[in-house]
Image: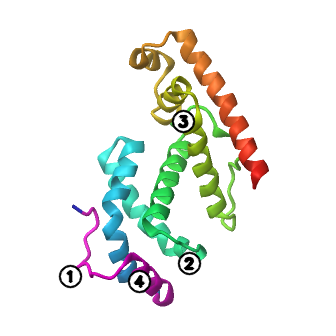
Amino acid sequence: MPIMKLNGSSLSKESDESLLEKYTSSEDLNVLGELYTRHSEMVYYVCLRYFKDEEKSKDAVMQLFEQLIVKIKKQTIQDFPKWLYVVAKNFCLMELRSSKKIEISTDEFVEFPTNLHPQEDYAEKEERLSQLEKCIQKLPEKQRISIDLFFINQKCYKEVVEITGFSMNDVKSYIQNGKRNLKNCMEKSDEQI
């Protein structure tokens, strides 16, 4: 069931591409609302995966809709659902980071500005976060699991030990080595740009 409801509007059979084109030319929020409603459930579950909180995830769905009003005009979008998935995922990561729930700054393995200016290129920021997630997926399994539990799910060392069955020394080693590997991966991706 979609999270967003449109007042008195039924979803048309128009393609995502057609609705996207219609919105960019008319800036009609009803058209954007219709397009977004189709994918709002996916956005909700992406947010729920990161926030682990239903209400916060519902709020994020609405906040993301408001951001799309501006974002869509600034970017060329080939595949709306894939693009929206990346935008939602990066929104969640930034929210977690800015709320200081991630105890360690991603700056330790990513050169990433902490003070963003309004005119700064948000597409570039989203690309960096997307690259970070790709690098996390490339980590050896034990490092990836430890990094995910410690940073994304905000578990303490003791909780990571309890969940994984790894020893305390191993967990600390996996996190330290994982951070180093992430830094190297991000630096390599920067060189390729």
The residue that mark 2 highlights is 73
Residue 175, disc: none
Q: Residue at x 41, y 83 (%)?
A: 18
Q: Residue 61 is drawn in which quadrant?
A: bottom left
Q: Residue at x 56, y 13 (%)?
A: 170
Give the mark nearest the N terminus, 2 or 3: 2
Q: Dot 4: what SS?
A: helix
Q: Dot 3: what SS?
A: loop
Range covered by the magenta-colored residues: 2-26
The kind of residue tagged 1 is: Gly
Q: Dot 1: what SS?
A: loop
Q: CA distance from mark 4 to mark 1?
A: 21 Å
10 Å crowding of disc 3: few (<14), some (14-19), many (20+): some
Q: Residue at x 50, y 89 (%)?
A: 25
Q: CA distance from mark 2 to mark 1?
A: 26 Å
The kind of residue tagged 4 is: Ser
Task: Where is residue 157? Give x, y as percent.
Answer: 50, 18
Residue 102, disc: 3
Task: Where is residue 123? Give x, y as percent.
Answer: 62, 63
Q: CA distance from mark 2 to mark 3?
A: 31 Å
Q: Residue furthest bottom?
A: 26
The residue that mark 4 highlights is 18
Closer to us: 88 or 7: 88
The reply to whether the C-beta atoms of the residues labelled 4 and 3 are less than 8 Å apart is: no
